[in-house]
Image: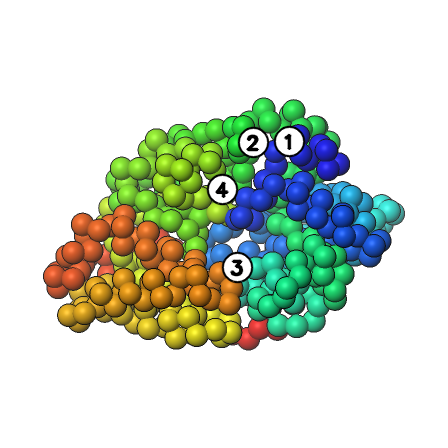
Amino acid sequence: MLDVLARSGMRGRGGAGFPTWRKWSAVADSRNGDAVVVINASEGEPLSQKDRTLLAFRPHLILDGAALAAETVGATDIVVYLSTGPGTAERTMKEALAERARAGIPEPRIRIVHTPHRYVAGESSAVVNRVSGGPAKPRFSVHRSAAKGVNDRPTLVQNAETLAHVAMIARYGSDWFRELGTDFSPGSTLMTLCGNVRHPGVYEVDLAARLGGVLEAAGGTHSPPAGALLGGYFGTWLPAAALDDLPLDGERLRSEQGASLGCGIVAVLSQGGCGIVEATRILTYLAAESAGQCGPCVYGLKALSATMERVARSEAEPDDAGRVRRWVGMIRGRGACHHPDGAVGQLSSALSAFSDHLGAHFDGQRCHGLGVAGLPPPPAPGRGWR
């Protein structure tokens, strides 16, 4: 199985894009016959719908991939990691588990663990912490979860979509998988299209495609786009001029635009929306989602979001431009986890992509984007960690 995955070139679909076979190999090398496989289907990213869609329509495909992973790395437990709350995804997953039990399929014990719907609850170490019985917060550890994860057992934490692809690769082979995509980014990916799109939703997309063709297949846009956010709330804002010919291949996206599809999100901003306003709304939400474990996150993001809210309202104080630049530099790279980095990263990309319009905010010109929901609005901040 590891050889097949290596030949396929499959990379994780949870956001990091790490080669799947290497992640599995690390757990297999640490195994003592008591490893754990965690299906990470918490989907705390507000703009994403792909994992819940996959769980609702193809739960057995995910479970097949998890069973293959367990056999490969020597796992005796499979955990389905879901956000708290009733929904179609959990109902269909429970039905699928019951069907597998009735069919007598020989596989490890599979159980569901719930997590609060918090943004950082899907981070790998937060997943391990929650499944081990703790709060769904990133944890500090000198050990990788591949060696010491859930209850100090070797642990593979894998995104739901990744496992579904694995099941298909196991059935049809690595050459079949490479019929789509590029050398660096083979295969297809599930993409959530939202915002200024005529037919928003989840699409399976060839990674050799360009964004303009994908948007055309989704019916085009309601109005000329003003830009787009790629990769979700930890993603990258790009101006409208970059979108039509934008490659989806991960290597080209990174080298040409410094961007990534992340967990497969393209949120298109309408011409009437404002990237500065939307980036500030996201930053404010992320500041409220802090796990409260370090100063850069607790105090830095809060102060930065308060300043950016003044800028978005075109009520900036004289030194706000300097404050924003200074605090972005002070916060980046200093957090206990990657939450502060992701928050300031999306803000920085917005300040760059919409630099011309940013000047109008600092000049006190009221922005029409304040009264427009250019993207789906952020949800209310979560409560609790268990």
Front disc: 4 or 2: 2
Check contact, mark 4 vs mark 1: CB within 8 A. Answer: no
Judging depth in this view, the residue of 290 and 268 nearest the camera is: 290
Location of residue 343 by image quarter: bottom left
Q: Secondary structure at mark 1?
A: helix
Q: Earlier in the sequence, mark 1 or mark 2?
A: 1
Q: Secondary structure at mark 4?
A: strand
The answer to whether marks 2 and 3 mark residues whose Cβ atoms lie closer than 8 Å is no
Instruction: Give the left or right position of residue 108, taking residue 380 as reference.
Output: right
Give residue 364's quadrant in the image.
Answer: bottom left
Say which residue label 1 marks: 8
Residue at mark 4? 191
Q: Residue at x 27, y 59 (%)?
A: 277
- Between tags 4 and 1, which lies in front? 1
Q: Position of residue 125 (x, y in %)?
A: 61, 62
Residue at x 71% of width, y 68% of height: 132
Instruction: Tell me the SS state at disc 2.
Output: loop
Quickly name the residue at label 3. Answer: 44
Residue occupied by mark 2:
186
Counting labels gives 4
Between disc 4 and disc 1, whose residue precedes?
1
Q: Amino acid at mark 1?
A: Ser
Q: Residues within 10 Å of mark 1 (few under 14, many from 20)?
A: many
What's the CA distance linking mark 4 and mark 2?
Answer: 15 Å
Amino acid residing under circle 2: Pro
Position in image of residue 74 (x %, y %): 81, 49
**Residue type for callout 3:** Gly
Q: Quadrant of the C terminus?
A: bottom right
Element class at badge 3 = loop
Q: Quadrant of the N terminus?
A: top right
